[in-house]
Amino acid sequence: MTTAKDGISALRSLKNYLIFLKDAGYSEIPLETKWNPGSSRQRTPTQTLESSPPSSRKAMPPKTSNLTLDDVKKELGECTRCKLCEGRNTIVFGSGNPNADLVFVGEGPGADEDAQGLPFVGRAGQKLTDIIEKGMGLNRQEDTYICNIVKCRPPGNRDPEKDEIEACKPFLIKQINAIQPKVLVALGKPSASTLLGRNVAITKERGTWHEFQGIPLMLTFHPAYLLRAYTLENRQAVFSDMKQVLARLKS
Ligand code: SF4
């Protein structure tokens, strides 16, 4: 039976979705959207853009590691494996659900992240949260895991350097192996290039599927880039990329 609470929750989700669509540059609801605001179900992944829940998870390749995220964190310890340890306040390991179907991989912590020890908590983080929650209808903490290719803040927010990425990458790989998500999303060029092991032209290759160790990998813009280049085209591009991700989560 649909309760008043369910109705209010559905209306709130609808409002968030409409705000997100407006933000993404839409003046009307895209035809292919199957969102069902009348559903009495509590929100499930994919409810906002797609009405059906994803199929049972973990149909992906077998785990290549028995390590848990806690094991990986312990192994990382108070890491001094690269020079980024010198200026950091905290190691930003990652946050979210250790069994998430969806993992976002960013570039590296910024000032806010370094201060709080959590990934994507500044302006770009808020944008990513909006994309996940308002756009995709997921709960950031419950439905996703978010981490970066380097876990310590590069000085002045510069790009991480090759030796730093190489030093930190084994831990990113171990994190992904521990989680074994159904889908990975690389946020921006450094992340995409690190995961694919080649120089990725993100403006050309965003929106395309690749694989990382057998896991489907979608490339999209970093939310910080989206904020810097807040064009209709870029917002719709990210919207379209995330729709593809939701469809893959369901398959
Ligand atoms: S960036 Fe990674 S490898 Fe470098 S010190 Fe931090 S945790 Fe260690």
Image (cartoon, rainbow, N blue to C red):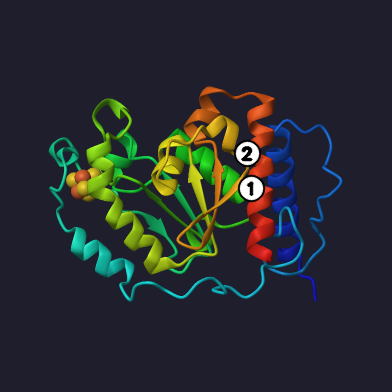
Q: Residue at x 60, y 57 (%)?
A: 138
Quarter of the picture holding the N terminus: bottom right
Q: Residue at x 30, y 35 (%)?
A: 160
Residue 113, image x, y percentages: 33, 41
* Viewer-proximal residue among 243 and 3: 243
Q: Could you say which is closer to the camera, residue 38 or residue 89? A: 89
Identify the residue position indicated by label 1 in the image. Answer: 242
The percent position of residue 209, horizontal first and vertical second, equals 60, 50
Q: Residue at x 46, y 42 (%)?
A: 192
* Disc 2, SS: helix
Image side of residue 101 versus residue 26, left or right: left
State which quarter of the image contains the C terminus: bottom right
Above or below, comparing residue 51 to residue 238 in the picture: below
**Are the residues tagged 1 and 2 within 8 Å (C-beta)?**
yes
Callout 1: 10 Å neighbours few (<14), some, many (20+)?
many
Mark 1 near ligand 1 (CB under 8 Å)?
A: no
Identify the residue under disc 2: 238
Give 221 or 3, whichever is nearer the viewer. 221
Q: Can residue 90 be seen in this view?
A: no
Residue 222 pos. (x, y %): 49, 36
Q: Residue at x 53, y 38 (%)?
A: 127
